[in-house]
Image (cartoon, rainbow, N blue to C red):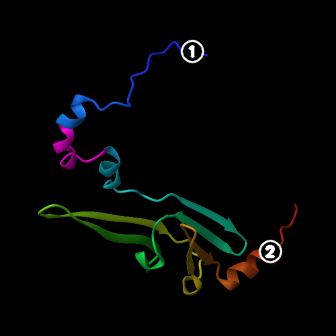
């Protein structure tokens, strides 16, 4: 079957390929431009009778890249990472740096046991477990409601 749409044959090089090739080193590609923009990881927060779960999507990072701080009733999850790519070429060395960082803060509920908060990083997801205080758990479990 023959297509009715004419397509440009890209098997032969264009005159513009050679003309613009010296500038390709100076003009970053689109994906390199967007790579430098800060990204804020997505977060899912769920609650059950034992406490709260926070799942932060942060693929490509290492466990050591994360910093988790608690100040008052606020928890902050942050990360900073710097990469350098060094390439040896004809008569010079070119270095490219990539700096990535983010910070997310959340207000902790009153019933969270701050001493038992745990964090684990696996498969590109940082999982935080924020358990409830024991007295709050018992109070919730043993509560009875009177019908009037």
Q: In the rendered view of the protein, which quadrant contains the C terminus?
A: bottom right
Residue at the far left: name it.
91
- Residue 111 visible: no
Query: Percent position (x, y) of residue 137?
Result: 72, 79
For marks 2 and 1, give the CA distance. 74 Å
The kind of secondary structure element at disc 1 is: loop
Q: Nearer the viewer, residue 141 or 88?
A: 88
Dot 2 alpha-carbon crowd within 10 angstroms: few under 14, some 14 to 19, many 20 or more = few
- Residue 108 visible: yes
Residue 112 marker: none
The kind of secondary structure element at disc 2 is: loop
Res 115 → quadrant: bottom right
Question: Please, is residue 5 above or below residue 61 in the view?
Answer: above
Look at the image and give the residue range highlighted in magenta: 20-29
> Mark 2 — residue?
143
Please identify, in this view, whether the residue under mark 2 or under mark 1 is nearer the observer: 1
Residue 2 marker: 1
Res 54 → quadrant: bottom right
**Disc with the residue nearer the chain's start (2 vs 1):** 1
Query: Percent position (x, y) of residue 26?
Result: 18, 48
Question: Please, is residue 116 above or below residue 121 in the view?
Answer: below
Question: Please, is residue 16 above or below residue 72 in the view?
Answer: above
């Amino acid at each position: 079957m023959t297509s009715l749409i004419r397509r440009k044959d890209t098997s032969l090089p264009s005159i513009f390929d050679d003309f613009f090739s010296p500038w390709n080193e100076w003009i970053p590609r689109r994906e390199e431009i967007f790579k430098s923009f800060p990204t804020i990881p997505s977060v899912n927060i769920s609650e059950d009778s034992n406490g709260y779960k926070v799942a932060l999507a942060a693929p490509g990072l290492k466990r050591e890249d994360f910093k988790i701080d608690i100040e008052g009733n606020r928890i902050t999850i942050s990360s900073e990472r710097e990469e350098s790519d060094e390439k040896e070429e004809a008569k010079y060395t070119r270095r490219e740096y990539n700096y990535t960082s983010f910070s997310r803060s959340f207000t902790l509920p009153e019933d969270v046991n701050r001493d038992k908060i745990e964090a684990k990083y696996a498969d590109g997801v940082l999982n935080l477990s924020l358990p409830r205080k024991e007295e709050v758990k018992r109070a919730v479990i043993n509560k009875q409601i009177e019908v009037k």
